[in-house]
Amino acid sequence: MCTGNICRSPTAERLTTAYCATTNLTNLTTSSAGTRAVVAHPIHQDAARTLEALGGDSANFAARRLTQKVAGPADLVLVMTRAHRTSVLEVAPHKLHRTFTLVEAARLITKFGAQQIDALANLRSHVAADESLDIPDPIGQSPEVFAAVGRQIAELLPPVLELCRPA
């Protein structure tokens, strides 16, 4: 989840789909939304180029807005910034222990050994309050910034997705 649902979150969504296809992770369903999305807007062209260069498919993407109906059934909600996490909790407060920034979730797995989704919330206190947990918004930036953001997302996703693999 991000702001406009045209850059970061669709990149994460579509890279997740690609990762699942190449690693035989078949039980995972993924989707994305934005806190201020222009519904049905296509993925940003620089994000699409970045996504495709990373092995994802940008075809037929349409932005959608964050709602309780979107967040409610999710086992895990990954957001791009702490502000986005707050937005999720405003529409789905019961998701407190299931909503993390992508950076935060990856750190809790790689640095603190989270072995399951439920463990993420228990380990959250290990992340310092002043640690940077946000993935920057590339809107208005150069194609190189879009590429850097895409690479960051691509590097953070695998440990989180492996956490979702059934035992």
Image (cartoon, rainbow, N blue to C red):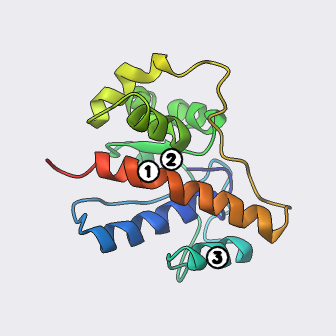
Q: Earlier in the sequence, mark 2 or mark 3?
A: 3
Q: Residue 117 appears at what percent x and percent y?
A: 30, 36
Going by the numbered disc 1, the residue's amino acid type is Val
Q: Do the CB atoms of the residues marked 2 and 3 lie less than 8 Å apart?
A: no
Query: Label 2: few (<14), some or many (≥20) within 10 Å?
Result: some
| Amino acid type of the residue that numbered disc 3 sits on in the rendered structure | Ala
Q: Residues within 10 Å of mark 3 (few under 14, many from 20)?
A: many
Q: Where does label 3 land, which residue? A: 48
Residue 147 seen in render: yes
The alpha-carbon separation of the residues under discs 1 and 3 comes to: 23 Å
Q: CA distance from mark 2 to mark 3?
A: 24 Å
Q: Which residue is mark 2?
A: 67
Secondary structure of the residue carrying tag 2 is loop
Which residue is at the front of the view, 25 or 27? 25
Indicate the position of residue 21 as horizontal and vertical percent values.
31, 73
Q: Nearer the viewer, residue 119 or 74?
A: 119
